[in-house]
Image: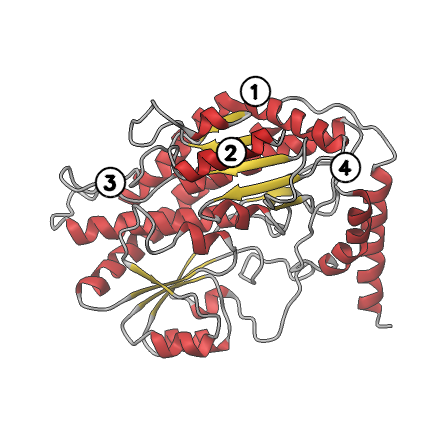
Amino acid sequence: MKRRDFLIRATSAGLAGSCLLLNCYRYKKYREDVSQLYLKKCLEIFRLIQNQELPKLSHVAIRAAEIYKGGGKLHSHLTSGEMLQYETRFNRAGNPGYFVPLAVEEDQAILDTIQRGDFFLTDKANSKLLLAKQQGIYVVGISVPFLPHKFTPSDRFVIKPDWYPIEDIANVVLYSHVPIEDGVVSFPEYPMVPLCPASSIIQSIYFWMLNAEIAYQVQVEKTYPFISRARDYIEKIIERIYELEKQTDLMYEAARRMAENVKVGGTLYVYEQSRSLIAEACNRASGLMLTKPLLIDAVKPRDNVIFGAESSNQAADIELARQLRNRKCFVVTISPFDTDGQTEGPLLRKAASLALNNLSGESQGVVKITKEAPPLCPAGGVLNAIILWALTAQFVAEMINLGMVPYVIMGEHLIGGAEYNAAVRRFFIQRGF
């Protein structure tokens, strides 16, 4: 056996063993504000984006608007996070539709689609995509923890053949400022990785910031004095995170009851009609092995369901939540409490066991480009994901308070990650959390 392979396996076995031993002890009680730690970490990242990345993004948006107005195409290829294909979908309300989504995984097919003079937004870097920049395509990269960039520590990262640093293939790089593990909340019970990821949230925010800025450049001819609609978008997110802190007592109550349900045999499901929250929560690096997509025929009393929604008044959502309540599930909804001002009549929050407000009831979006035009760029998907992980952080704390340490997924882009997951998964299957 090679020395490197031996060290990887030994390290993974040690981490797996330490995680198993943790369940033999009862650790000190966590305070009721662990959810705030996640919100605080998000705010720190958003401030870095405002200070360091917004000027670059504004420059990029001006270039994109010029390409668009000149007849070129804007292509979006964000693949390092399954939430993104749903959050940034072309037919989403509030999406101005400037970017043509490229869902094609075959890189040669992508090169055959985009043309010289086009704009290409991506989080992926390899030798084929390097050709895009060389062929006169304007490439903007977004850094992610799973793929190499100039801040990636090589001693912890699994380097795969034909992977390039994002800087090699992009004209401009927008950095996510997310740790290599992707998680941002550290627990001493998890020495291998911090928990609760943020990279897909950051990519989604960049997507909507770019759309807001491009819309302004396209729709408003006079651009002096310069107004940043991208800044408007991220400031809306920041303002609402401060408002979310008022709901941390509710997150604590939800997390406590969820942990009590797991202790008596319940599990944790996630549902959202758009599938965005499901993709973000399930099988996620620095997330929980416990979390899985809702299986309506499999639910039983004392199961937990985190139920996300982009609007508050969808009849199908309300009926499904009622069915789950009738089956004695604990249903935590994450949604706006109103949609476009509608506060009466059937609403999802009324069908919940406990409701969390994403403060984003604007169906079209939160950025006004002109007084006459409807707003663009929705905030609900981003806020739903932020609430999901803030609640998850508190849930982990409450599980530990009850003497249980739930198993987590270690990103397989980290050295030892795949081996760690394989080592602990069989124990997770036996224990159930």
Q: Looking at the image, is mark 4 or mark 1 earlier in the sequence?
A: 1
Q: Label 2 amino acid?
A: Ala
3D distance between C-alphas at marks 2 and 1:
22 Å
Circles 2 and 1: CB atoms closer than 8 Å = no
Which is more toward the observer, 366 or 139?
Answer: 366
Q: Looking at the image, is mark 4 or mark 2 earlier in the sequence?
A: 2
Q: Compared to 138, does 191 lie above or below?
A: above
Residue with the mark numbered 4: 405
3D distance between C-alphas at marks 2 and 3:
30 Å
- Find residue 321 and name its label: 2
Closer to the eye: label 2 or 3: 2
Indicate left or right for 362 with 241 as reference.
left
Residue with the mark numbered 1: 249
Residue with the mark numbered 3: 375
Q: Label 1 amino acid?
A: Asp
Q: Position of residue 226 (x, y in %)?
A: 20, 44
SS label for mark 2: helix
3D distance between C-alphas at marks 4 and 1:
22 Å
3D distance between C-alphas at marks 4 and 2:
29 Å
Q: Quadrant of the N terminus?
A: bottom right
The colour style of the image is secondary structure
